[in-house]
Amino acid sequence: MIPILDPRPQIEAHWAELNAAIQKVLRSGSFILGPEEQAFEREAADYLGARHAVGLNSGTDALVIALRALGLGPGDEVITTPFTFFATVEAISQVGATPVLADIEADSFNLDPDSVLRAITPRTRAILPVHLFGRPCDLDRLGALARTHGLHLVEDCAQAFGAGWKGRKAGGFGAFGCFSFFPTKNLGACGDAGMLTTDDDALADRARMLRAHGSRVKYHNEAVGCNSRLDELQAAMLRIKLPHLDRWNAQRRAVAASYRDALAGLAGLVLPELVDGHVFHQFTVRVQDGRRDQVQAALAEAGIQTMVYYPVLVHRMQLYLETHAATRCPVAEQAAAEVLSLPIWPEFQAVPTVAAALRAL
């Protein structure tokens, strides 16, 4: 079976360093907010070009804490995409705000700025774009919308660590950038882990307060926060991996280019564009003419694992059926019925096998 992702080559290639880092942490006796976590915050901030990086225990918490730090809550609206992992919209609901769903662009799968503009109301407080599959959103247009209408821009960069927009790293264009280091991500930990970035000193201070039960000083709690801290073991392993990320992302782009060459001209298959800054967390094609499920089943029979991200749009989920009954996102609806993600990771070498299987269908 060709899996959708195989993280083992990275682990094997850096086994000695990772093992040494783990032993160093275990023998230090410092496991929470220690020197490894602090060093990783500095190194990640430098890499991303951010003033502050705040280590957390998940990308979901990064979203929640970012929205809470901005003071969003009941009565506020946040515009985002229906074509995303549930955590994006879940975070909005967790702080008591109302998610408003705008449609996506057909080519990028990212938020359509024109649809965002139509969704803005007097209650809108923020725009939350998702850099889906590793492709940056149109940050020029979305940033301009946020500035014109006095809105916060919060970037969901869970799938886009290292992605870039016109020479700058994703995550540095809004009030916050929110990152996940879930093991499947381009920069993946060996468990749950996350981070947010900001250039605002006051927002960084509030985020650090919220991640530690709402306290800046132990036992002096100022707000109802949460327990969301990047642990030393994950930070130590992420520090080993970070210097290799640009090479790994370049390898992902090379795999994507190979896919595009091998699948060029195949009828009924729409390939993702190889645009600047795209780091191909996923290589996601469109299978047209209602054949997606048939193609996926045939590839599975050929020993090739694929995934559908995401088959159920947010407003079609049971939780939001009533509140979002009037939501219409036809481009996202079509994408949900057509998308299929093919195997990809930096060391992937089976593009000819996958392409041959697709051409044989």
Image (tube, helix red, strand yellow):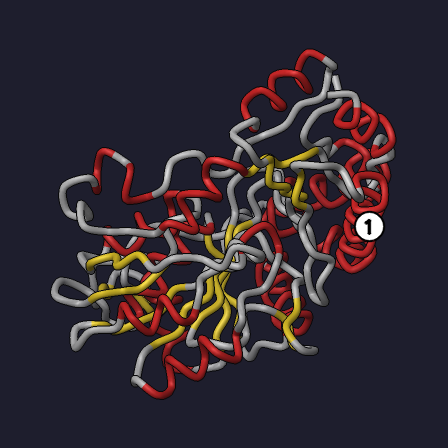
Vertical arrangement, residue 202 with respect to residue 62, above or below? below
Q: Is residue 199 left or right of residue 249?
A: left
Residue labelled with disc 1? 257
**Where is residue 298 drawn, in percent x and y?**
66, 16
* The C terminus, quarter of image: top right
Is residue 19 visible in this depiction of the protein? no
Q: Nearer the viewer, residue 34 or 331?
A: 331
The residue positioned 42% from the left and 48% from the top of the image is: 332
**Where is residue 345 drawn, in percent x and y?**
75, 40
Vertical arrangement, residue 69 with respect to residue 31, above or below? below
**Where is residue 28 drawn, in percent x and y?**
64, 47
Secondary structure at numbered mark 1? helix
Q: Is residue 349 left or right of residue 188?
A: right
The residue positioned 37% from the left and 80% from the top of the image is: 146
Is residue 64 visible in this depiction of the protein? yes
Q: Nearer the viewer, residue 110 or 31?
A: 110
The quadrant in which residue 111 appears is bottom left
Vertical arrangement, residue 293 with respect to residue 312, above or below? above
Q: Nearer the viewer, residue 215 or 115?
A: 115
**Where is residue 196 drawn, in percent x and y?**
48, 63
The quadrant in which residue 69 appears is bottom left
Extreme bottom residue here? 148
The residue positioned 37% from the left and 49% from the top of the image is: 330
Extreme top residue here? 301
Hey, what amino acid is under mark 1?
Ala
Q: Nearer the viewer, residue 210 or 13?
A: 13
Q: Is residue 218 left or right of residue 185?
A: left
Number of numbered discs: 1
The residue positioned 53% from the left and 59% from the top of the image is: 131
* The N terminus, quarter of image: top right
The quadrant in which residue 170 appears is bottom right
